[in-house]
Image: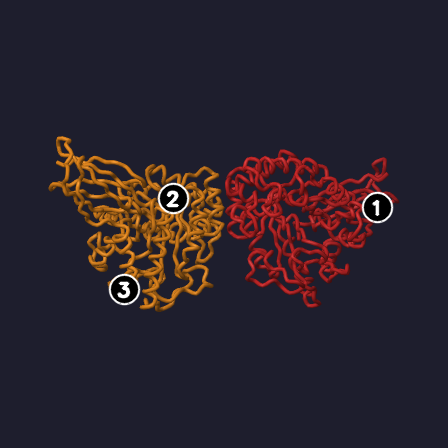
Chain colours: A red, B orange
Amino acid sequence: MRHRSGEVLATVVDAGGQPLRDREVVVEQRTHAFAFGNIGFDFVPLANGEPGQPAGALADLWLDVFNTATLPFYWAGFEPERGRPDTRRLRRTAQWFTARGCRVKGHPLVWHTLTPGWLSGLRIDEVEAAVRARIRREVADFADVVHTWDAINEAVIMPVFRNEERPNEITRLARAWGRIATIRLAFQEARAADPTATLVLNDFDTSTAYECLIEGVLEAGVRIDAIGLQSHMHQGYWGEERTLAILERFARYGLPLHLTETTLLSGDLMPPEIEDLNDYQPPSWPSTPEGEQRQAEEIVRHYRTLLAHPSVQAITYWGLTDRGAWLGAPAGLVRADGTPKPAYHALRDLVKGEWWRPPTTLRTDDAGGFPVRGFLGDYQVRCAGRTAHLAITAPGRTTSTLRLG
Amino acid sequence: MRHRSGEVLATVVDAGGQPLRDREVVVEQRTHAFAFGNIGFDFVPLANGEPGQPAGALADLWLDVFNTATLPFYWAGFEPERGRPDTRRLRRTAQWFTARGCRVKGHPLVWHTLTPGWLSGLRIDEVEAAVRARIRREVADFADVVHTWDAINEAVIMPVFRNEERPNEITRLARAWGRIATIRLAFQEARAADPTATLVLNDFDTSTAYECLIEGVLEAGVRIDAIGLQSHMHQGYWGEERTLAILERFARYGLPLHLTETTLLSGDLMPPEIEDLNDYQPPSWPSTPEGEQRQAEEIVRHYRTLLAHPSVQAITYWGLTDRGAWLGAPAGLVRADGTPKPAYHALRDLVKGEWWRPPTTLRTDDAGGFPVRGFLGDYQVRCAGRTAHLAITAPGRTTSTLRLG
């Protein structure tokens, strides 16, 4: 995977600038540049010192594999009472992750599902004003800790969404304005509140409809930073061929691809005739030994396929544990009892094994030089009792001089 | 169907402007404003005095029901050798129809299927120039006889079309530029060549993808005059509910809807698993008595549903006879032996029966007035041995004074 790794010809020098020749150096990878993400929803209580699950053991499992946390900004849950957003708890959670070296992503700023009850009955211009204000507020309040946002979620279906008890106000807005104007609103407000944020257009629809929408958005001059592709595979692993075909189709726009919501089941699959995944929630949906083996094999195949494509910059797995998993499906990498499934180990073996440089001892040459090869990311170099940091930021070969002491 | 009909309170006056009181008038409808279309492909030889099928009897059947002919401008057939377009034969055919009171539509100016062989191997800018020139040429050459064009056909699938032996140059163009830029090209060139023409965006895709594309096109400022919805129903009649749902979704854009390619079979249906209809062509596909009854019932239901929706301005049935029908399917309204099927009679009973005003005798009142109620269209009024013309152009009630003599 040439596009995922690089080589730095490093030179260590002492405080006076003299090369440290023929010395032992220990090189160790510290982070991945690639975003290995997962949702951090479960850790809100823990980060806020609230009682209840999960225990720290689950956090350790999370932090050992993932480096990017998606936090929930579903409007209904975040601001159930108008004017009283859950900002403090979410900020603490974001800070909990950043303090542990993780990046944080917010999901989502605009979506037609999970809209707050107080929105209903407002005039359309009041809905618009409320949506604009909510985007500005969240993006500004979290600008120091959240650098990536799903600016808008599932815009393809948004104006025609029907699978709900009462019509929601965001669908009303999208229907009145059209998809592109609604998308423009989301990106404009978020961009204004934090010009440095990475703003994602996110959808589960990987059909031609999403292509057409993206082309319309780009033609309309709306700048999007990444194309988000959900990949809940409750009905079965896509396989390499389908996955690559999807990546190729969406890579055409020259934008980074974020695989935003990835799941693979370790139990029975959802029947293929279900169209809206929400429509299938059996009373019991256990993880099975055969399912866990299959999940482990598939997660390796899927992550290999995705990382092999140069456009993919992020993969977010959707959930660590089966406890409380979406739809009750056995989509987690950890069982409800807290023990890791084979898929957890398999993914860790990639992220912290095959794609990771463990502490490695090298010797500097006559000019104090030594090569550091590895996946893009941050590295630590120890030599002569001192430590320096080194980043491999791009494929190919670069040079770097590290001053020790 | 209030939106399809109107009432004119007409007054007949003599050459001196005096009302013709208490006189007998005969009112008779001559044309429908609504476009009842069919393809006119079969009549190119007849219109050009060439030997072979069809005979005039088929033309009579055509002209008795339909008022709008779609003529074939498939590039491969129209200009098989570069620089030698089939303009003369097609112009004669268009004139043959206009001489018989019909309107003519051209299909299509840009499409990825049936591209000429000489296009392959050209550089992309040469392809662009050729496409532009071809649009300008056809629209200008036919500006006096063709007033409606499918400016571009099947743009949703255009850049990702794969179902062909060799990749075609129009797909290459659409892939390089994107759908919207390709659509813009088609509309710009056609509009420049004939600013008065009705330009249609036409597609078989009635999914969300087409909605997204339309929204992108409108946001990009491309003016389209009508949304074309193909409705080949080889896999079965859509039914009222699905038809209405589609009409509602596409009526949202405030543009006229043209149902551009309508077929209903009078034999076995195509299996539902076929995605590209071209992939299914059995060696024999007969029209059956049961199928003909079903087709007759369905065509009535379908035309009633379409005319009941105010946005629908045109319906083009795709073929009159089974002889040479697309895919060999029994989609015609006339059997291969030239005899009309029940569906032909059923459609005629609507177009020239229920929705038509036959010669009707009325008497003028004391002011020379009489009401003409009927479907929008042109009417003839005979009184005192003279004839006048009257148009019902809009729903509601209007007045008109007709000078006789």
Secondary element type, mark 2: loop
Give how far across and how far down residue A156 sits, in percent. Answer: 54, 48
Nearest the eye: A139 or B220: A139
Decide: marks 1, 2 in contact (CB < 8 A)? no
Measured in 3D between alpha carbons, the distance from the residue under mark 1 to the one under mark 2, in whole angstroms, is 72 Å
Q: Chain of mark 3?
A: B
Q: Is residue B92 visible?
A: yes
Residue at image x 64%, y 50%? A260
Question: Up-down: is A183 above or below B50?
Answer: above
Question: Up-down: is B399 above or below A4?
Answer: above
Q: In front of the other: label 1 or label 3? A: 3
Secondary element type, mark 3: loop
- Mark linked to residue B336: 3
Which residue carries the number 1 mark?
A382
B23 with respect to B166 (left or right): left
Q: Residue furthest right?
A: A385
Indicate the amino acid at tag 3. Answer: Ala
Which residue carries the number 2 mark?
B256
Secondary element type, mark 1: strand
Nearest the eye: A12 or B81: B81
Among the two numbered marks 3 and 2 on one chain, the one whose residue lies closer to the N terminus: 2
Give how far across and how far down residue A150 sits, in percent. Answer: 63, 44
Mark 1 neighbour class, 10 Å CA radius: few under 14, some 14 to 19, many 20 or more: some
Q: Chain of mark 1?
A: A
Q: Is residue A371 visible?
A: no
Residue at image x 70%, y 64%? A287
Give how far across and how far down residue B158 sits, in percent. Answer: 45, 50
Q: Chain of mark 2?
A: B
Mark 3 neighbour class, 10 Å CA radius: few under 14, some 14 to 19, many 20 or more: some
Indicate the amino acid at tag 2. Answer: Pro
